[in-house]
Amino acid sequence: MIRVLLAVLLSFHGYARTTHTCISGAQESSQGRMLKYNACLTRDDSVAQDQLLYYFPGWREDEEAWFESSMGKDIRRFWVERSGRTLPVITFSMGSETNIARDDWPSLTLAQVLPEIERRFGVNPSKRLVLGKSLGGWNALQLVMADQDYFQRIGLICPAVMPVHPWSSEQEIDSYRERSGVRRVVLKFVLKRMRKHYERYSNFQPFDPYLHLKNRLDASAPSFFISANREDEFGFQVGGQDLKNMLVSSGIDVKWRLHEGSHCEVDAGAVAEFLRP
């Protein structure tokens, strides 16, 4: 299915025609599970033709998130003001599934799904960037762990990364709560949602960045931008800090931002500057 929307957006340099096109599709994993996706391409007259940004939205957001959100609009406005051009953006959503860390979905996405999406949209970038927010940050990280060379810049906004999981001990969970300040009822909710995706620990283990990040990424990996908020109600600022430390210890360049505020309050200017075409 393809739907197209032509919009006129007011930018710093006047009016620019923005094309917003959406598609849907599916690919079957080696375990027989269907990866269903929706994707929207947003681009305008001042787009950088050789580059492409993939955006993975957060939980309860969808493929329209970039086009409709104030963050997306603020970043596009920043690009026009600073560079006179924008990036084409493909927003990738799996609908109600939300979690890409299942079966062989990360490698399947890189090898088949994203190339299919680019073919259908008629884009052929020489440089790909990725930005993920919250659960979308977790999904983007999974793709990077599957192939550190696929994207040339990696932005993670309040990524949903924690040092605990549904099979962690009570001592580990209490330690995380003390570090993060997350309320017990909130953490219980997050762990319950994680448990729905994984029947047992052995299903989750291959995707745990605390176990595999250092083995799958080395000093030749591209630069990261990671941001988090001090009052994140899920405690993801702890996972963001841990992720930054692991990457830096592997010799990877990381631009780290810890802001005041609650979950995923974004400094759009800092994100835009990191990704600027």
Image (tube, grey):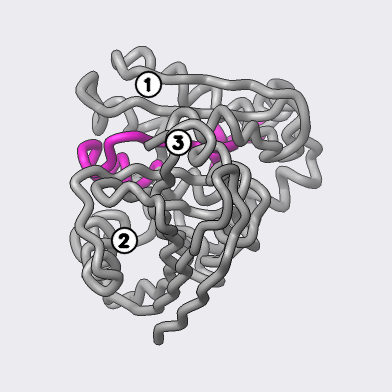
- The answer to whether the residue labelled 2 contacts the one labelled 1, judged by CB atoms less than 8 Å apart, is no
Q: Residues within 10 Å of mark 1 (few under 14, many from 20)?
A: many
Q: Which residue is the site of mark 3?
A: 155
- The answer to whether the residue labelled 3 contacts the one labelled 1, judged by CB atoms less than 8 Å apart, is no
Residue 247: mark = 1
Q: Earlier in the sequence, mark 3 or mark 1?
A: 3
Task: Inspect the image, locate mark 1, and give the three-letter code of the amino acid beneath it.
Answer: Leu
Measured from the top left, where is residue 76 in percent x and y? 53, 46
SS at mark 3 in the image: strand
The CA span between labels 3 and 2 is: 20 Å
Residue 192 location, quadrant: bottom right
Q: Residue at x 71, y 39 (%)?
A: 263
Q: Earlier in the sequence, mark 2 or mark 1?
A: 2
> Which residue is more in the foreground, 270 or 162?
270
Q: Earlier in the sequence, mark 3 or mark 2?
A: 2
Measured from the top left, where is residue 42 in percent x and y? 45, 61
Q: How many marks?
A: 3
Indicate whether 159 appears above or below 103. above
Task: Inspect the image, locate mark 3, and give the three-letter code of the amino acid beneath it.
Answer: Gly
Indicate whether 213 appears above or below 117. above
Q: Residues within 10 Å of mark 3 (few under 14, many from 20)?
A: many
Measured from the top left, where is residue 140 in percent x and y? 41, 46
The CA span between labels 3 and 1 is: 13 Å
Residue 263: mark = none
